[in-house]
Image: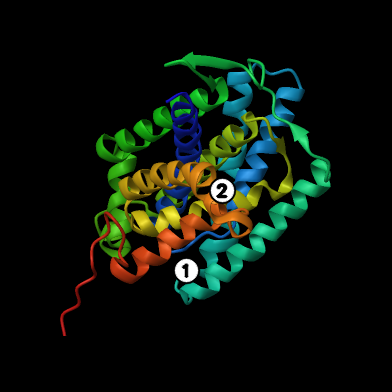
Amino acid sequence: MTDLVQLASSGLALGAIYALIALGFVAIYRASKVFNFAHGDLLAFGAFAMVAASGIGLPWPLALLAAMLATGLLAMGVERVILRPLVGRPVFVTVILTIFVGYLIRTAILLIWGSNPRGMPTPWEPTATVEILGAKVLLGSLAALAGAALALIAYFLLMRFAKLGLAMRAASADQESALALGIPVGRTLGLTWLIAGMLAALAGTFLGMFPRQVEVNLAFVALAAFPAVLVGGLESALGAVVAGLLLGLLQVLAQAYVNPLLGHFGHNFHMVFPYIVMIIFLIFRPYGLFGEAEVKRV
């Protein structure tokens, strides 16, 4: 029971991070039909920005806010300067360009902070634990769960009740109709990228809070969250959150219980397990848990 509680807390914390990353992917895709392959590099930038902000003496909450804002503004700048001039071009052109933008961000990280790993500062000891049902759970895991929950609730409240959320939903449904109704689609797209960048920075900070180091390869964690986007539904924010939590939990449980059963073949099997789940969904339910099958009239 003790081991299960520890594994469940670690899995849900990892899943909460996956949910934040997947939600950033989905928010941008819903708004502009572009899959942003630079999202992982924004995550790494946010983590390094958090380390830098803490390094200049800012209190931890202000440092986190500064890192999120800096990453969000970077994402907004990418959309405004690089991607918006390509409106009307084939989607694959924009998608390929996001890959190039990711390399630019990665290069900027190396130029600014170098290639040496950095430690993520926290208000508590990195290995601090809290006892829950007899199990010692990392405080960083609980912080990741709580912080991600607050961010996700704020996002859904924004989408449901704020004018910006209404504009984002209208723009994602039909940009031309939104423009005809007087909705500033360009500004809405920019703010969508801002929010996605802030979510990426938050996810990068939580990843660095575990006893691991912040490095430029942190960007590849976004690829691990990719299955959550497809399993949940490419245009479903709720699906991205649910699938992210489930896949994070399943990945940790697979590492503990499935890997040992497979012997030598089980080495790092848990890393590919989410992709196996994704492939199964693509075969039997290609539109995801909460996605809707596209119906076209002929």
Q: Give the x, y percent position of residue 223.
A: 56, 56
Q: CA distance from mark 2 to mark 1?
A: 50 Å
Image quadrant where one finds the N terminus? top left
Q: Is residue 32 visible?
A: no
Which quarter of the picture shows residue 153? top left
Q: Give the x, y percent position of residue 88.
A: 44, 73
Which numbered disc covers residue 260? 2
Q: Considering the numbered disc 1 on the image, is that residue within a helix, a strand or a loop? A: loop
Horizontal side, residue 255 vs residue 250: left or right: right
Which badge, 2 or 1, is on the more N-terminal residue? Answer: 1
Residue type (three-letter) at the residue carrying disc 2 = Pro
Which quarter of the picture shows residue 210? top right
Tell me what residue is drawn at x 60 percent, y 27 percent: 64
The 10 Å Cα crowd at callout 2, few under 14, some 14 to 19, many 20 or more, is some
The residue that mark 1 highlights is 87
Image quadrant where one finds the C terminus? bottom left
Q: Give the x, y percent position of residue 92.
A: 51, 74
Asked whether 167 or 20 is in front, the reply is 20
Asked whether 263 or 31 is in front, the reply is 263
Tell me what residue is drawn at x 50 percent, y 14 percent: 131
